[in-house]
Amino acid sequence: MNSNPSEVVQDAGIVYIVDDDASVGEALADLLGAAGLEARLFSSAQDFLQSTRPDVPSCLVLDVRMPGMTGLDLQRQLIALDLTLPTIFITAHGDVQTSVRAMKAGAIEFLIKPFGDQDLLDAVRAGLAKDSSDRREASTIAALRERYASLDAREKEILTGLVSGLLNKQVAGELGISEITVKVRRGQIMKKMQADSFADLVRMMETLRRT
Amino acid sequence: MDRITRLGGRSARRFRLGLAWVLVPCIFVFDTVTNYEIAGAVFYLVAILLAVGLLSTRGVIIMAGLCVGLTLLSLAMTPRGNWNVGLINAGISIAAIGITTFLAIRILVAEAAANNARVQLTRIARITSLGALTTSIAHEINQPLTAIVTSGHAGLRWLEQEPADLDKVRRNLDRIVADAKRASDVIARVRTLARGGVSIKERVNLQDVVADTLDLAQADLRRNAVEVDIDIDANLPDVMADRVQLQQVLSNLILNATEALKTESAQRRNVEIRARAGTHDEIVVSVKDNGSGVRPEMLDQMFDPFFTTKAAGIGMGLTITRSIVEAHGGQIWAHPNDPRGACFYFSLPTKDSSAA
Ligand SMILES: Nc1ncnc2c1ncn2[C@@H]1O[C@H](COP(=O)(O)OP(=O)(O)O)[C@@H](O)[C@H]1O
């Protein structure tokens, strides 16, 4: 949207606007552009689904009432495709039921048209921040998984024993190996998992178990 | 309109009509050259039946007359055969033509009446479904408003930049102008809609309109145990008005009265419709109820768009009612009723001076 990015400092990230009303969509894109955000405009949910989206923090500004696939349909579809994006709904009427449904499905804001520019920008910035922290978390978890996968079977057994609170000696007894082996292996596990401390290691395992 | 579709396109219509007109002289020649014993004239029926629905009622009558004339001419010109048989055959043919034409025309008239009734019903339905339409109208107006507000904010931001990006400011201003135009177009459309489209003024007898309206409202009135008293001066002159719109005015007032009565539980629910000659060349109609009533400060506001005290109200009823009455050159006003309830009055000129 913004043809001259050097004029304004760009926040990292892209805001996708899906609105069937050309005028409203253009005005939104222009407003975001003026606030230094990159916006991409789509006139239907289908168009948006078919687009290729770069792998950067992004969020979605979505009109509820559109012919064909509505905003809520699109939200549902994205969830089904595991492509959740922080979503800001814009709607003409404060239909409580719809907004409750949208918020339950993870929308971050529900704005009633016409809305103030600051409300929209705040919501969009919150959306981008949420997406970038979601992405950071996702990549941390992916890295953790990879490290965990690099452990061999014995190391995984030892790790499980240790984080469940057993002493080196107990783990050794349980697995039928010597305590010294457990100590050595423990050092290797810490290194492979890139854990600074044993507490760190426990936290990592906790995260892995949660996801 | 209906007829055209039933017969297939225009060309099919023309073909049928052409065939009818070609048949007539053919039959005439056949009837004339054959003996009296052969009743060729009954075939004129085919031509008439082909023409029914394509010609106006008058056209059909003229054609039937022509056929009767030609039958008689053939009778006079046929050279051979038994004259008596010829006379009887001609008589039978003429009777058949007459009866068929009469029946065909009756069907045509009934069809036209049915068509008319349907058009009227559609108009009533369209006006009364305005409630449902309001939501979509609100949406249609809200869209350009949203674009205007957002473009305004965007424009301000481009203006505040150092240096201001005037091209982008202009782009936003252009969009604002276009969207404002769009919103006013929607409003213009709604206005025509509220007027019920083109209004058709005709001589209307108020007693008839009241009776028609009550017929429509009857189910609702009975369900809510509302009694209606009618007191209309039998000597009132007709008014020049759009019948459907006038029904709309009355049914809105009756509906409001019913709703005002619904909130009051234990009492006799009563609506009184009166019509009297006014002081100038006008008729004054009143619809009085003994329902919840109106506070004096509400009397003017009530007619404003979207003014409503009802949870599910839209506040367009009285607005539309007033616009119809004013389009007819009349006025509408209300008073609190004594001891309770409200009374709505509207006037209609009896000399057509309105400029719709
Ligand atoms: N017969 C009546 N008795 C009492 N109040 C009335 C009556 N008719 C109209 N009103 C008042 O006027 C308001 C506006 O009426 P109207 O324009 O028909 O819209 P709506 O019926 O949708 O509210 C109503 O909400 C009601 O408060």
Image (cartoon, helix red, strand yellow):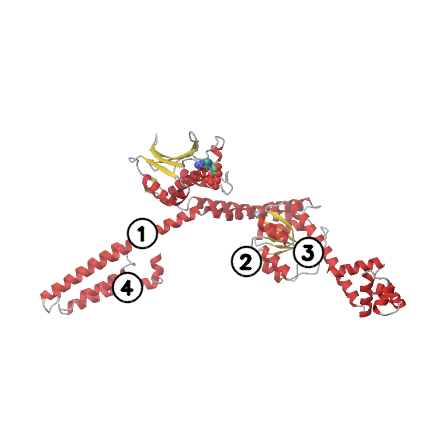
Query: Image height check: is A129 above or below B295?
Result: below
List the residue tagged with mark 4: B18
List the residue tagged with mark 3: A58
Residue pictured at 9% horizontal, 65% vertical? B84
Assign a secondary structure to mark 4: helix
Q: Residues within 10 Å of mark 2 (few under 14, many from 20)?
A: few
Chain identity of mark 2: A
Q: Disc 2 to disc 3, how far (Cα)?
A: 24 Å
Assign a secondary structure to mark 3: strand
List the residue tagged with mark 1: B113
Residue pictured at 67% horizontal, 51% vertical? A124
- Mark nearest the camera among 4 and 1 is 1
List x then y, in percent, for residue B102.
23, 56
Assign a secondary structure to mark 2: loop
- Mark nearest the camera among 3 and 4 is 3
Residue B16 figure quarter:
bottom left
Check disc 3 and give the amino acid type: Ser
Q: Nearer the viewer, residue B213 or A19?
A: B213
